[in-house]
Amino acid sequence: MTLPRTATTFAPPVMEARRWLDGVTFPDDRPLMNVSQAAPVDPPPDALRRVMADVALTRDDAHLYGPVLGLPDLRAALAEQTRTHYNGAVVAGQVAITSGCNQAFAAAIASLCADGDEVILPTPWYFNHKMWLDMSGVTTVPLKTGRDLLPDPDVAEGLITPRTRAIALVTPNNPAGVEYPSGLVRAFFDLARRKGIALIVDETYRDFHSQSGAPHDLFEEAQWDDTLIHLYSFSKAYRLTGHRVGAMVAASARLAEVEKFLDTVAICPGQIGQHAALWGMQNLQQWLAGERAEILARRAAITTGFPELADRGWELLGLGAYFAYMAHPFDISSAELAPKLVRDQGILCLPGTMFCPEDDASGRSQLRIAFANLDARGIAALFERLTGA
């Protein structure tokens, strides 16, 4: 009996982890620290919320179906921002707005793959990418990274077969936090172009990259769109996670195929969120710079405070964007340790086993900490709890 597509993959990891909270109580002086999900818990800034309220009250068309590929003004604005940020040639017709970046990835795969095709994912991987490939009948080919958590293009080349349709990278990486050097991203682009496959680059966390300026030069390449499919999210930048506003930048011919997928899944992205993203791009750059500075300060707090954990056998494997990826020193799998941390220390985080194949033993010693909702004081408290684990 053939399984339905949803039965071919695992349960959503964040939802699975939340079930560890059932029946557990947390005292007032030791509340739960939820570092399981990479999403801001604060709402958008007040000025943006007022804009959204005004759109809801005064724009009748915001309550109707909109263009499948997104509002023209937002597409044009993102094309202009991409041109400026990456010093490349991008036009509005190469931009699609999607219902979150996950949908952008799903649409990209739908435009690339048939049943039995293959996509290469570096491990540890972003689990929603793996889940979508499973449910699409696409074989995920794991590309194991080294101790620095950076994928090797030479190793990737050895994994390419006649069924390979794409390599998908996430930088800054989810779950590992590492920022892929520009030269490494370029090497993967050159490999993909040479092999006639696509390179998907998911830059959901681009706005929190520690490097100023463009993180790579792919958009400077002539005819970049014969290989590159670029994904982006407004959700983290402007705290719009609940409004689901993502984007894809790719060849206009690919977007014609993507439009078929989007039209049958959501018809159009939510318009209030799109208007919010556009206004944010036009008015909140200084505010966003402050958000980035705060995330970088939290990253620095992890670096400063980690030696105390290191003395107890912990290892910081990756750090960047919203994530610290750690190796624990205990003689149990992270799949057992993570629920135990909920009960014993009031910490909800995700085990490395959720980010790699079942036969990859490295996940047993790893944990992902999503620290976007912990300030420096909260990070210090987290480390204090981990030292007592």
Image (cartoon, rainbow, N blue to C red):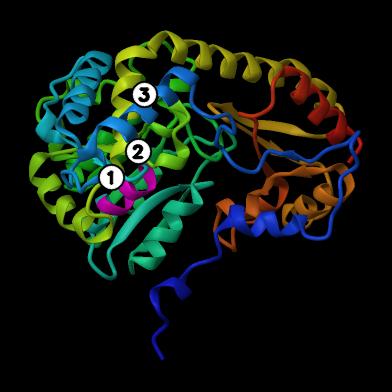
Residue 345 located left or right of residue 297: right
Q: Indicate the quadrant where residue 200 lies.
A: top left
Residue ID at (36%, 22%) = 182
In the rendered image, the vertical position of residue 352 relative to residue 92, given as above or below: below
Disc 1 is placed on an element classified as: loop
Give coordinates of residue 229: x percent, y percent.
24, 39
Q: Earlier in the sequence, mark 2 or mark 1?
A: 2
Residue linked to disc 2: 245
Give coordinates of residue 140: x percent, y percent.
40, 59
Residue linked to disc 1: 269
* Mark 3 neighbour class, 10 Å CA radius: few under 14, some 14 to 19, many 20 or more: some
Visible residue check, residue 112: no
Give coordinates of residue 157: x percent, y percent.
32, 47
Residue linked to disc 3: 51
Please state which of the two labelled residues, at mark 2 or mark 3, is closer to the viewer: 3
Kind of residue indicated by mark 1 = Pro
CB-based contact (under 8 Å), mark 2 and mark 1: yes
Look at the magenta stretch and give its main secondary structure. Answer: helix
Disc 3 is placed on an element classified as: helix
Residue ID at (28%, 43%) = 98
* Mark 1 neighbour class, 10 Å CA radius: few under 14, some 14 to 19, many 20 or more: many
Q: Earlier in the sequence, mark 2 or mark 3?
A: 3
Magenta highlight range: 101-107
Question: In what quadrant of the picture does the C terminus appear?
Answer: top right
Q: CA distance from mark 2 to mark 3?
A: 16 Å
* Mark 2 neighbour class, 10 Å CA radius: few under 14, some 14 to 19, many 20 or more: many
Kind of residue indicated by mark 2 = Val
